[in-house]
Amino acid sequence: MKSILASFFLQTGGMSRKLRRVSKHDSVILMYHRVVPHDEARSGIQAGMYVEPYTFERHLGFLKKHFVIVPISALLSDYEEVSGTLDAKPRCVLTFDDGWHDFFEYVFPILKTHQVQATVFLPTDFMGTGDWFWTDRLGNLLYQREKSGNSVSLTQSSTNSFVRRLEGLNDPIEGQIEKAIGMLKALHNEKIEEILRELSARWNLDAAPRRRAFFNWEEVREMAQSGLVTFGSHTVGHKILTTLTEPEIRDELANSRKRLVTEKAVDPAFISFSYPNGNYTDRIAKMVRDSGYDLAVTTENGWNHNGSDLFALKRISIHQDMTSTEAMLGCRILGIF
């Protein structure tokens, strides 16, 4: 039904009229995570974490028609300085969190074809390793258990209440993954790792998928040298900052910035930041600014305007089920649904 309504809104010109009323001084930052084919997405990836390559390319067609796509650094400049045109289109920034290898495989070639720029936020300790985020290892465990027909035989109940709750999930697999991740997000990373180790042992399953998840630094430098991809910080270990002490937060901010500069992934004159999971406070935002970053993005939904806080910039989350067509993408950006 949403797809039908969105298509009608696009075809009747309502969407174009609404977009033309947006000030050229307003900007929208789109938040992507992964771009993967449908078959790969079915193997334990959260529904809100991906779009398909064909969908992303269609997005670019729509965005180039209705927006001026600019690098994130352009948000520090006046509109006329970056647009090079009197066209009154609003600005759009493409951002991707996490540094997934599928960006290099699927998105980078599309950006080169369309000559469009994007920003990727990197959790620096994961680059060039075989490690995976705990969220994906948990999703993989649940997916493997589901694939085996939930045939895991347990003779004794766990003493850990979170493990017991996770073992009791019986929703469809997509719902299990969403509930499980939501259940653990507020915990400190060490506690989460204990839970994953126990689940892996109890179910006799390997938590980590066997393929590589993230870029290596050679790939990062190749993309940076293209001029089409800029990089920012997503901390060192992708830990939710509101669960850490202030010294831990400072270490995450300083060490991530230092690694990005050392690996020649960024120009030290401008480095952006993305809060993992979007969690931050005014105090954390000040720490980000004091650590030498130039702006920071959140996961708060909406547009940015003249005078927006540069360390609390809003983004609009983009994923396959809500933006599978150009019309649905437009409705998502405009806040219609």
Image (tube, rainbow, N blue to C red):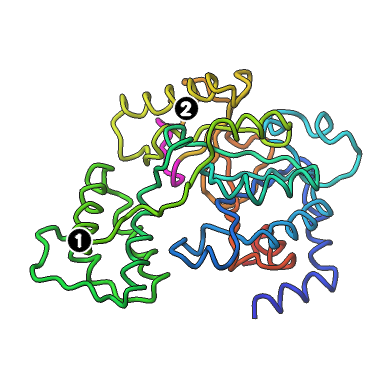
Q: Secondary structure at mark 1?
A: helix
**Circle 1 residue:** 163
Q: Is residue 134 left or right of residue 212?
A: left
Q: Secondary structure at mark 2?
A: helix
Q: Are marks 1 and 2 in contact (CB under 8 Å)?
A: no
| Mark 1 or 2, nearer chain start | 1
| Residue drawn 20% across the image and 48% down it | 194
Residue neighbourhood size for the residue with mark 1, other residues' Cα within 10 Å, grouped as few (<14), some (14–19), many (≥20): some
Q: Is residue 119 magenta?
A: no
The magenta stretch spans which residues? 276-284
Measuring from the top left, give residue 96's x and y in whole percent: 59, 45
Picture mark count: 2
**Circle 2 residue:** 288
Q: Is residue 153 left or right of residue 130?
A: left
Judged by its main secondary structure, the magenta piece is helix
Going by the numbered disc 2, the residue's amino acid type is Val
**Near-viewer residue (104 or 287):** 104
- The Cα–Cα distance between marks 1 and 2, rounded to whole angstroms, is 35 Å
Q: Is residue 81 left or right of residue 212?
A: right
**Near-viewer residue (16 or 320):** 320
Measuring from the top left, give residue 147's x and y in whole percent: 36, 73
Q: Residue 220 is drawn in which quadrant?
A: top right
Going by the numbered disc 1, the residue's amino acid type is Val
Measuring from the top left, give residue 214's x and y in whole percent: 50, 43
Q: Where is 178 relative to 211, above or below?
A: below
| Residue drawn 82% across the image and 29% down it | 81
**In the image as oriented, which residue stretches furthest toward the front?**
210
| Residue drawn 56% across the image and 58% down it | 50
